[in-house]
Amino acid sequence: MSVARHDGRWFRREISAGGFAFFMNLPTMLCLALVLAYPVIYAGYLSVHRVGLAQLRRGEFPFNGFDNFERLFEDRLFWVALKNTFIFTFITVGAEVILAVLIALLINQSSIWTSRVTRFLILLPYAIPPIANGLIWSFIYSFQFGFLNRILFSAGVITEPINWAGNPETALYAVTVPYIWRTLPFAILLVHAALQGIPRELYEQAAVDGATAWQRFWRITLPLLRPIIAVILILRTSFAFAVFEEILAITQGGPGDATWVAAWYSYKVTFSPPNNFGMGSASAYVLALLIGAMALIYVRFVYRRVTL
């Protein structure tokens, strides 16, 4: 609400809801701008300059236009990393959404005491730091003394140890399991919270009309979960595209280039000789643009406003 003077008289003018929301969020937006704007702008500056160890010593960054981007797109390893990133993201995000919906439905059907215990157990993987999670799974995948090979061998599934993280054909898929195990609880909690907000009267009315369990899920539950599924897709895709810790702890990009992903590529280009900071910044910008494009696709085709 604001106060203004008109024709010698004072009167009050109501502020719209959008204006009120803007002013309430203004301090947060300013803080984010101060924290994020400078690194983003500076990275953009580096992406169009030649920046290596020699330039850092002299403090001079010659302008080279889009040369870093041209070299990036001509690098075969960049396209390998991009392909691996898309495969990794497709597997992890798809598995998280499907498993989150299934597990949240199971929790929602259980008793109050059981659901509380289950939610506590589900949260445990999410509390583990990513690098620690990668180290744990590197021991599980160990070729010589890993628990996974020992369990499968004892169960008679395999007759000789399998080098899960050291085989080019299985390494990328092996890394997806630790990542899903760590990040799945976040998606489960979001879906479970959304399920709690669905009125029970809708299911009761559908049951009276003779709808089966599958029809109730397809016609009621899934449409009402679309907004939260879109949120999960956007957030999890963003983080999956930038996966780094599990790659560092389990495979370090190997064997060969089998687990090179976009974030690992940016890291290696930037911090490995000849330390091309400009090209690393360019690859990070391409990654950010891809994430933004994926987010727009999700909002366009997945998100739907549902009114009851």
Image: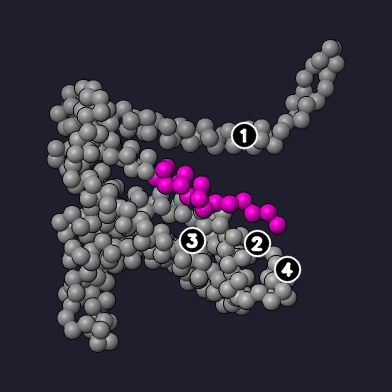
Q: In this picture, which residue range is highlighted in magenta?
A: 291-308
- Name the quadrant of the C terminus: bottom right
Sequence-wise, which precedes: disc 1 or disc 3?
1
Residue at screen point 42% across, 47% down: 294
Kindly identify the amino acid type of the residue bearing the numbered disc 4: Glu
Can you tell which mark lies on residue 22? Answer: 1
The location of residue 69, given as percent across then percent down, is 25, 34
Given residues 217 and 22, the one toward you in this image is 217
Q: Is residue 269 magenta?
A: no
Q: Are marks 2 and 4 in contact (CB under 8 Å)?
A: no
Kindly identify the amino acid type of the residue bearing the numbered disc 3: Ala
Residue at screen point 35% across, 50% down: 241
Which residue is tagged 3?
187
Q: As drawn, is 283 to the left or to the right of 228?
A: left
CA gap, disc 1 and disc 3: 29 Å
The location of residue 60, given as percent across then percent down, is 21, 22
Which residue is tagged 4?
201
CA gap, disc 3 and disc 2: 16 Å
Sequence-wise, which precedes: disc 3 or disc 2?
3
Which residue is tagged 2?
197
Given residues 127 and 89, the one toward you in this image is 89
Q: Residues within 10 Å of mark 4 (few under 14, many from 20)?
A: few
Mark 2: which secondary structure? loop
Sequence-wise, which precedes: disc 1 or disc 2?
1
